[in-house]
Amino acid sequence: MIDFIAQVAPMLLDGAWITLKITFISVSLAALLALPMSILRIQSSRVYRWPVKLFISFFRGTPLIAQLFLLYYGSGQFRPWLMDMGLWTFFRDPVNCAMLVFTLNSLAYQTEILRGAIQSVDAGEIEAAKSMGMQNSLLYKHIVLPLAYRIAFPALGNECILMLKGGAVASVITVMDLMGQTRRAFSQTFDISTYFLAAAMYLIIATLFVMAWRQAERYLYRHQIQRTPGAKSVTAAAT
Amino acid sequence: MDYLTYLSLGDSGWGDELLKGLVVTLGLALCALPVGLAIGTGVAALSISAHKSYRWFANVYTTVLRGLPELLTLFIIYHGVGLLINNTLKWLDPSNGFFELNPFGAGVIALGLVFSAYAAEVLRGAWKAMDKGQREAGYSLAMTRLQIFWFIERPQLLRLALPGLGNLWINLLKDTALVSVIALDDLMRAANIAVGATKKPFLFYLTVCLAYWAVCVCCERLLAVMEQHSKRGVRVSR
């Protein structure tokens, strides 16, 4: 058993590093883009709102693996054109494709989370700010966004976990992430413990992440925790 | 060849193969749903029981199954349960042949398990959100525990859990695409085969995406109607 772990674990750790890298980059890029997208999403003009709505609906209504195949294999159909554009080197690499698809997918979910949060900011706070003559940019910077991110924070943490798990499908397009290495190790050893080892690693990563997120949450909600002693964390569960 | 010819029914196109795949996909989701709901209800019942060990078990069950990638769960079931059955068969009688768990069965079990873990959390939340005075009212009318559950708690539980379960159903539909990886001839794999033969990956994967999208949007609409219907008895506060 120890021998087996010593043999397989280094491979899996390599994979885990790739998984973490892909997840981190995709989720962070999506987080940056989610803010402008969610502001477009709540505009009253249909011209801004509908494209974003369509984008969100598509990425939330189709399986991640289908999106991945569409981009990675589908780009092959436009190979000559992509080569002319000089983009083929990007699309040829499965890791790039996976990161692009995960970013877009996470963007759709994060935009929707943030939209909900912005819309659930107490109308009274916005009215108070407006009555003090705050312009829109100031209003968003000092009132709406800090409150919205605080509301969205637990949901955004769940989204990160979902992306970590969902990222396992990248192994299907030959990305050697944790799942990819696991499948390779299993095909070499035919030992079911490989999967259990990978399962343990996924659980450890997810648990550590949840613990870190809770700490951050405690910091964000510190003004509320003091007011209601003994209140439980807002994130009730891992996902 | 024209794009529409590729997607046409019959021998010249792949439309009928894709439709067959869609039927398998929907069938898989529909088979996994009752499995997941049944196990999920059981786990939810454990999670609200008075025994600490039952609650602990339910907690571990939901945490583990919700923390693992669906793909990994699928592989563990597909290879693991197959291995387990084979070893048991060999142990019972060494002359037994090799048994292969079919991908559909593995898919139903794996997706059902994943669904059950999330459903247990949804049902537990719905149970906690229910007004406890309702049960007391039932007792005061001399109803039995079973009557209270069936006539008072069950309908309210369904109403409170419906939005969450609806989301899980949509997720389940999308997760079925993963089963193509273990060679079940679902929509996704039908497209893979078509792409192998025609070298038109974008066309076929786009078709697959649009098919899933259409199914999901239809389900979302249906669920919205069901939610409205389930809320018909709730007094709207003004």
Image: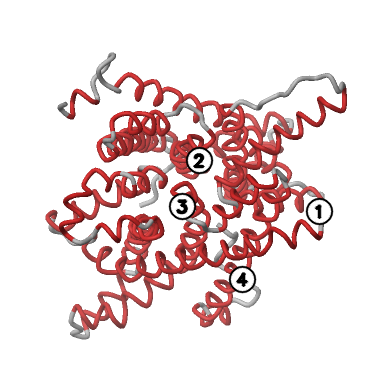
* Residue at (76% x, 46% y) in the render: B49
Labels 1 and 3 in the same subunit: no
Label located before the other in sequence (2 or 1): 1
Q: Which residue is mark 4?
A: A211
B154 above or below A100? above
Q: Which residue is mark 1?
A: B52
- The amino acid at mark 3 is Ala
Label located before the other in sequence (3 or 4): 3
Image coordinates of residue B83 in percent, x first then y, are: 73, 34
Q: Which mark is on residue A170?
A: 3
Pointer 3 chain: A
Q: CA distance from mark 4 to mark 2?
A: 27 Å
Image coordinates of residue B139 in percent, x first then y, are: 71, 37
* Front of the two marks 2 and 3: 3
> Quick check: marks 3 and 4 in contact, CB under 8 Å?
no
Indicate the secondary structure of the residue bearing disc 4: helix
Indicate the secondary structure of the residue bearing disc 1: helix
Q: Which mark is on residue B165?
A: 2
Image coordinates of residue B72 in percent, x first then y, are: 59, 47
